[in-house]
Amino acid sequence: MGLTALSRRVAKKQDRGKLDAVNGVDLLHGFFGWVTNLDPIRDDDKGSYVRVADVVPAGRSVLVTVEAGRFGEPGNTWEVYTHSLSHTRTSNEATVQRSRLLFILPVASTVGIFAVESVAGSAGGAALVDKFKAACLSRWDKDYWPLDRIYEKEDWFALSELKQLTAVYHRWSRDIGDGSQPRRVVGRLERHLYPVEGEASLPKRLWDEIRRGDMTASSIIGSEIDDGGDDPDAVLAQVSSHGRTKQIELGNHRTPTVREVLSDAGDPPPADHEFVERCRLIADEHYQGMTGKALPVDTVSGDWDDDALNSTWE
């Protein structure tokens, strides 16, 4: 799951307009009316198909269940245990994955947050976010509607713990030689550095020295393996902060975008209420960084009145 922020810049002004009062329209209610009546999106150029399966409003949020997938190429669907053909797919049929999108917009806020779930590499909610931005531009064409990825806070790396270092040799050879003969590549080689038994992470001073550039990757994990004499092609660091773990390549990283693993491969995705609550907790952390305010307690709970439920997008 990743986070994206939507805001509105009023034409010829530098300030951001409040999103619950855009020329008399509460954008959260407007989004509900828009997505509820949205026709399936078929993109013939990209071969993508997106449809809305369910929309649930609560508090200052709207939860959308999306079905999205590819079409345009015929194919077969096989039952992997009986090895029998269960279905033949034509070029006009899409194999879809179900995922979710949560839109959070507090009262009087200048920022709305989209939490987009990706399942098996498919994130149909992202297409809806882009489509909704286009709808806002079309309706209020004199305003600007920035749509920005949300990144981890600046202190993410400073507060993170180093869990593992990996040196990667993509084309490793044991040949030493004098350079007169081509070296024989054995294969891809990786060397790992883990915390000692009983410790959850590598020493903090090691991570601090790496970030400052006071210690090279070669000196940390070894520049020579079996007298090969080569520095690794890449050194990967697995770091953890605020309950989230990421892998970065040393010397080739920026502050990462917010990405939350909701379930491991093979495990069922979290139920809707679990998904909503985890989105709220993570969104709250970054919303405070953007606005200086916490998300209200009732952000994802509370019934809508009839006027809100009958909102339309004209």
Image (tube, rainbow, N blue to C red):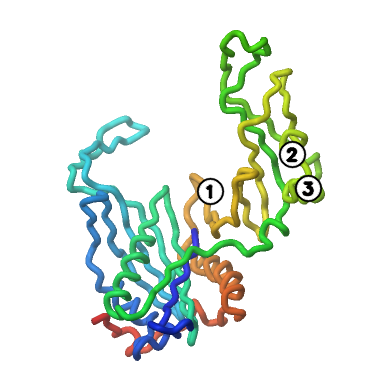
User: Mark 1 falls on what kind of element?
Assistant: loop
Identify whether 39 is placed above or below 11.
above
Q: Pointer 3 and pointer 2: residues touching (CB < 8 Å)? A: no
Residue 36 sits in quarter: bottom left
**Which residue is located at x 55 percent, y 70 percent?**
283
Of the two numbered discs 3 and 1 in the rendering, the one whose residue sits closer to the viewer: 3
Of residue 266 and residue 138, the one placed in the foreground of this image is 138
* Residue 209 - label: 3
Question: Horizontally, is 221 left or right of 79 in the view?
Answer: right
At label 1, the amino acid type is: Asp
Query: Residue 281 at what x, y percent from top left?
Result: 58, 69
* Residue 91 - label: none
**Which residue is located at x 68 percent, y 56 percent?**
157
Residue designated by label 1 = 264
At label 3, the amino acid type is: Glu
**Which residue is located at x 66 percent, y 33 percent?**
167
Residue 306 sits in quarter: bottom left
Query: Residue 171 at what x, y percent from top left?
Result: 57, 23
* Residue 216 - label: 2
Report the Cα–Cα distance between label 3 and label 1.
32 Å
Q: Residues within 10 Å of mark 1 (few under 14, many from 20)?
A: few
Of residue 143 and residue 46, the one placed in the foreground of this image is 143
Residue 116 sits in quarter: bottom left
Q: Residues within 10 Å of mark 2 (few under 14, many from 20)?
A: some
Q: Pointer 2 and pointer 1: residues touching (CB < 8 Å)? A: no
Question: Horizontally, is 199 left or right of 130 in the view?
Answer: right
Q: In terms of sequence position, does the residue under pointer 2 or pointer 1 come before the other?
A: 2
Of residue 265 and residue 220, the one placed in the foreground of this image is 220
At label 2, the amino acid type is: Thr
Query: Residue 88 at what x, y percent from top left?
Result: 20, 39
